Amino acid sequence: MPTRFRTIKLFLATTALFAPNLSLAQESVASPAPVADAEYSRNWGLSMINALPAYLKGYTGKGVVVAIVDTGLDINHPEFVARISKALHNFGTDKRLADVSHSVDKDGVPDGHGTHVAGIIGAARDGTGMQGVAYESTVLPLRAVDIGDPDDPEMDPTNEAIEYAIGAGAGVLNGSYGPGL
């Protein structure tokens, strides 16, 4: 039962990201930098979630670890340079390859789902491409989706990944689950 309560606590922390009270997010706030530029505009979702007021108050995700429970991450993607947690982990075997180490997305698709989701959350504000919501956060990729057996809780690694995220200090967790996952 304690495991379930820790899992619920992490999900509540995730929802706090979208609440007006940002006390569970970034502790210290830096002076705001101009943010409504071309890179900001390329991520239409930022205006949809009304991110600008938080940016103007200096919130960037700095110091926040965001766990992404998904298909893995292209760890060589330039949007995440020096911001990938060393606690990254793979919770199963790849269906296409032998057991893969850590959380590397090795399915041959450079912009796989986990990498895509990580970009929405934490792509760098670097003048190229688009920026993520928490562009200075640390990304913790946890590969646990599309592996194992989702119909058998003993073989589905998602719960294990969520518990691991809590132990690794994640303040926010993203799990993109839908039909077929």
Image (tube, rainbow, N blue to C red):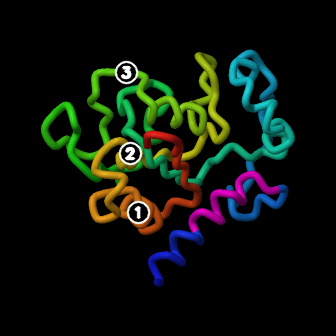
Cβ atoms under marks 2 and 3 closer than 8 Å: no
Q: What element carries label 3?
A: loop
User: Which residue matches tag 1?
Assistant: 159
Task: Give the quadrant of residue 133.
Answer: top right
* Mark 3 neighbour class, 10 Å CA radius: few under 14, some 14 to 19, many 20 or more: some
Cβ atoms under marks 3 and 1 closer than 8 Å: no
162 versus 139 height, above or below: below
Q: Is residue 109 left or right of residue 101?
A: right
- Which residue occupies the extreme front position in the image? 151
User: Which residue matches tag 3?
Assistant: 110
Q: What stretch is highlighted in magenta?
A: 10-19
Magenta residue check for 4: no
Q: Earlier in the sequence, mark 3 or mark 1?
A: 3
Q: What residue type is labelled 2?
A: Val
121 versus 36 height, above or below: below
What residue is rendered at 37% in x and 30% in y? 74
User: Which residue matches tag 2?
Assistant: 145
In this view of the protein, which residue sits in the foreground, 141 or 39?
A: 141
